[in-house]
Amino acid sequence: MRCLTLAVELKKQGAKVCFVSRNLPTHLSNLLDEKGMEYVPLVEDAIQESIDELAHASWLATSQAQDAQATIQALADQSWDWLVVDHYALDQRWEKLVRVSAKQIMVVDDLADRYHDCDVLLDQNYYKDMKTRYIGKVPEHCQLLLGPRYALLREEFRRLHDQVKPRTGQVKKILVFFGGVDADNYTSLAIQALAELKVSAHVDVVIGAQHPNCEQIQKSCVTYGYSCHVQTSRMAELMADADFAIGAGGSASWERCCLGLPALLVAIADNQIDIAKELNSIGSCIYIGKKEGGDLLSLYRAISQLLRESDLIREISQNAFLLVDGLGVTRVCREMY
């Protein structure tokens, strides 16, 4: 979604944009069609070389060399000013090969666990060491765009940032959102915890169309009188209306911060842990850890305690609101033009 946000803004400014991807889910390719984006799917190749040592190498479903050649072929009919790459299984080996297809390369990363051959590196996340974490991992000429100042948020978040105010601490509306897939089904745990707490607040639950427990969650929401939103286009509006959120770390953290929405976070993937910890350390969320398979008791206790602390909720909202202004995609585009 962060690449689509960037692409939409670039297209507004007159750029021609093309997406290249392998095994893109149907609902995402449909979304590209809705946005009028050109899309070239990469064909499935039998792996001829061993998968490399990168932690997320298996996500590529082929070797970097094969993927690079397929990408070059997909882009061979035109000359491209920029190639934007956002994939944890790609590093400098892939980037060196695809340089023949574009004048400049921008890498979107947040792991800082591999070397890149790029002209610009964008890491929109907050880290205390963000000024040093890429030292020795990018060329000397590489321009670093670091921190939530460059968070790639859709236009509606920037617009609503100018309209909302930090929360007062009173909780009348609660938003539950653990990402589109939520494999460990934290959504159901949060629903159960809120039901057992008998909260008087209105509860909005957001899930993706691909959620493996979609039908069961919808039934639970009917049982408890909660509103369930499946693959909604109203995410910014729901965040702006909520007084408190329960959810996962990751890119949604910057959307919540932009709208001053205080949140109780669980990391549902390893790459979310550091982000959630850093936000917790500066008082912009409450992070309760990463627990494989879910932990109802911990979630119940954390929600119960936080809902009793209106001053803390107000403080978290104020800190979060000051961290992200929603203008990140505009700043990134300026660096590209």
Image (cartoon, helix red, strand yellow):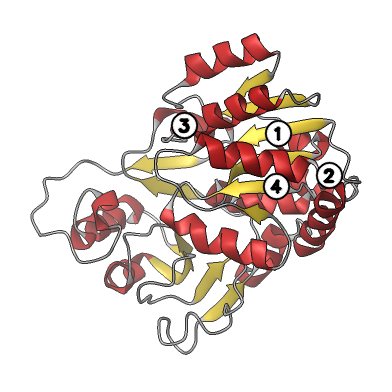
The residue nearer to you, when weighing 46 against 194, is 194
Q: Earlier in the sequence, mark 4 or mark 3?
A: 3
Is 180 drawn above or below residue 214 in the view shown? below
Position in image of residue 155 (x %, y %): 74, 46
Q: CA distance from mark 2 to mark 1?
A: 17 Å
Mark 3 crowd level (few <14, some 14–19, many ≥20, 10 Å Cα):
some
Residue 15 lies in quadrant: bottom right
Q: Residue at x 82, y 34 (%)?
A: 241
The residue nearer to you, when weighing 239 against 104, is 239
Q: Secondary structure at mark 1?
A: strand
Q: Which mark is residue 175?
A: 1
Position in image of residue 177 (x %, y %): 61, 35
Is 288 drawn above or below residue 277 in the view shown? above
Q: Which residue is mark 2?
A: 160
Mark 2, mark 4: which one is toward the viewer? Answer: 4
The residue nearer to you, when weighing 152 against 223, is 223
Q: Which residue is mark 4?
A: 263
Q: Secondary structure at mark 2?
A: helix
Left/right placement of residue 63 relative to residue 266 reads: left
Q: Quadrant of the C terminus?
A: bottom right
Q: CA distance from mark 1 to mark 4?
A: 9 Å
